[in-house]
Amino acid sequence: MSKPKKKSRNPDDTKRRILAAAKVEFAKKGLGGARVDDIAARAKANKRMMYHYFGNKDDLFRQVVEDAYGEFRQREAALELDSLDPVTAIKTLIAFIWKYFLDNPEFITLVNSENLHKARHIKKSERMEEMNRSFVGRMQHLLERGVRAQVFRAGLDPVQVNISIAAVGYYYLTNRFTGSIVFERDLMSEKALAARLEFNTQTILRMICTPQTLEMI
């Protein structure tokens, strides 16, 4: 009787499993707390193969962070904001970022972890540079469209606008546990989250829209 054939290894599948496992471990425990053995076990992969594909733990963490940003930017680009009028486009972007943070809490924890390490893993990343340049460019284009349509104020810095949109949601969610105690309010109830999105939207609109536009929306 002939021996059954061994299943051929699929390097791409193994890499995907390792990256998925690493994302979970790094998001839960940070770079310092995550263990290579736990990542390999979760991925059902040989630890030696993990080193072969990704180098050391720091290299693996860098790729996980890059992938997290990459997915975020891809989803953002898929909004096709150019097909919307400027006010609708900015409202769509604000809602998207808020919902993305809610649906992908690991993104926030990975970003927090990299900030603890002063961005040393992504500081020289060409991939990050390319992603970030394109998303700032999209905001610049959106603001310029708004100025031409006479609905946005002129002279707005696209970097500052991007930071502000992320900040009004990011701080709320990273401080949701302490905030619920300090303000004696369940910040994560459905009603509270809807109210916060509305507040975020109105805050940004008041920052970038002309007075005449604010009177109409």
Image (cartoon, rainbow, N blue to C red):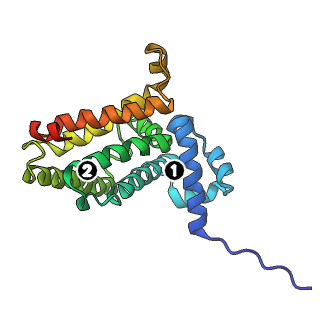
| Image position of 98 (left or right of 161) | right
Look at the numbered disc 1 and give the secondary structure of its residue.
loop
| Image position of 73 (left or right of 64) | left
Q: Residue at point 43% right, 25% down?
A: 175
Query: Which residue has dot 1 on it?
Result: 56
User: Toward which corner of the image does residue 202 lie, by quadrant?
Assistant: top left
* Tag of residue 88: 2
Instruction: Give the mark toward the camera: 2 or 1.
Output: 2
Look at the numbered disc 2 and give the secondary structure of its residue.
helix
Mark 2 or 1 closer to N-term? 1
Q: In which quarter of the image is the N terminus?
A: bottom right
| Image position of 34 (left or right of 136) | right
Q: Residue at point 56% right, 53% down?
A: 20
At label 2, which amino acid type do we have?
Thr
User: Toward which corner of the image does residue 205 lie, by quadrant?
Assistant: top left
Total labels drawn: 2
| Image position of 153 (left or right of 23) | left
Residue 117 position within the rendered picture, expressed as x and y whole percent measured from the top left:
40, 35
| Viewer-nearest residue: 94 or 8 | 94
At label 1, which amino acid type do we have?
Asn
Residue 104 visible in rendering: no
Residue 174 position within the rendered picture, expressed as x and y whole percent measured from the top left:
43, 30
Dot 2 and dot 1 residues touching (CB under 8 Å): no
| Viewer-nearest residue: 74 or 186 | 186
Q: In which quarter of the image is the C terminus?
A: top left
Disc 2 packing (10 Å; few <14; some 14–19; many ≥20): few
Residue 45 visible in rendering: yes
Residue 86 position within the rendered picture, expressed as x and y whole percent measured from the top left:
19, 52
